[in-house]
Amino acid sequence: MKKRITAPREVLHELQQDYFICTKCKICQGVHVQFCPESRFWRNCPSGTRFRWDAYYASGKMEIARGLHINEIEPTESMRHILYTCMLCSSCQEQCYEVKQLHPTRVFELMREKAVREGWGPMPEHAALAESLEENDNPFGADRKKRGDWAKGLSLKSLPKEKAEVLFYAGDAYTSDPALRHAVRAAAQALLEAGLDVGTLGAREISDGSLMLMLGDRDYFETYAAQNIETFNGLGVKTIVTPDTHAAWVFKEEYARELDPDIKVLHISQLLSRLLKKGQLAPQKEVPLKAVYHDPCKLGRRFDIYEAPRKVLRAVPGLELLEFPRATFNSLCCGGGGGVRYAFPDYALWTAKERLFEAEWTGAEAIVTSCPYCVQMFNQAVETTGSDMKVYDLAEVLLESLGKEV
């Protein structure tokens, strides 16, 4: 029997109890209203709110899963649109699990895997991402030889030629988007300022494969997982840290089973928070900014990491930390989740604009987040609306308060 590379593989029918007992109560459509005082912001499912049909909400997709299971329906273009406009943000599961212990997000992930196996998924627009991954080891078209260029001038060790205690994994977005270059450098520089022994793989770093997994192509994802696991296990590092929330997700959920058990996987916000608590980082420079923190879906609802980034921001002198009406487990997706933006850019931008409106409603001058895709979506929303809102990556704000530049 073939050894599983990552997490045990499930198929849709294994979750049949979830979609057979869904009563269509529609609790999945909103937020935990007791923690959101403004009724304007009670809806929280992007696809259901945007397209207005029950089929686009979680309860509708659960019914589709049931229909597919009993061969009551056949896949259609409408069904594919419904499935791939889901941002996999897990807001529905946040609501549902508290009451009924159902797992709608997992059902939708497995529906996508079923769609890929049967040939009706993903969307045609996603083909370019897979082609780029094949050619460049990065779905976003960046030259693989330049993947490590972001680190030029930083005192990072070069793995595996040198040994280091910490592997800094930059990720696909940070290594391909010049607009994110300052943010990823800030994250690495902060770790160096704390005196950590940090190295990178440079041009040897390859994709984590998370985008393919979100689209439902688990086989393609596992080719990258297998190669990364072999590489990571051979480096002799004690910690893998990444500023990429999607990389952290697959490292923690999927890779962990085969990773060396002595290797810890941390998102950058977790490590920065710990370094501040230990006194290895000491922000002193005032950053006079009224900022609202946006919780990335994978970091928050997936891993319950809410306090770490807020502790970082509270440690910054002069920064006033505000909260969205939809905050922490009620957070609205930025629009960049589930691979939606690559097939439905107008809809993704519509979602980002809604979140931007909510940020402006709080009176904030800036949105701070800790996910490259959130930064990209908010920058796009600001650009298209002409808003004065500033957008920062968490590490950028911290590094400024340390009085350092990259």
Image: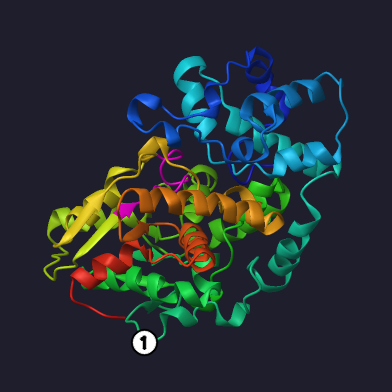
Q: How is the image coloured?
A: rainbow
Residue at screen point 53% across, 49% down: 250
Figure quadrant of the C terminus: bottom left
Taking the image as shown, residue 211 lies to the left or right of residue 37, namely right
Q: Please tell me which residue lies in front, 292 or 310.
A: 292
Q: Please tell me which residue lies in front, 119 or 294.
A: 294
Taking the image as shown, residue 274 lies to the left or right of residue 156, namely left
Q: Secondary structure at mark 1?
A: loop
- Total number of numbered discs in the rendering: 1
Q: Please tell me which residue lies in front, 137 or 292.
A: 292
Residue at screen point 60% across, 53% down: 348
Check the image and report above or below for 185 versus 223.
below
- Part of the protein shown in magenta: 292-303
Q: Can residue 210 be seen?
A: no
Check the image and report above or below for 401 versus 225.
below
Q: Can residue 110 be seen?
A: yes
- The percent position of residue 100, horizontal first and vertical second, equals 51, 15
Q: Is residue 223 magenta?
A: no
Check the image and report above or below for 338 versus 31.
below
Taking the image as shown, residue 125 lies to the left or right of residue 386, namely right
Overall secondary structure of the magenta section: loop
Q: Which residue is mark 1?
A: 153
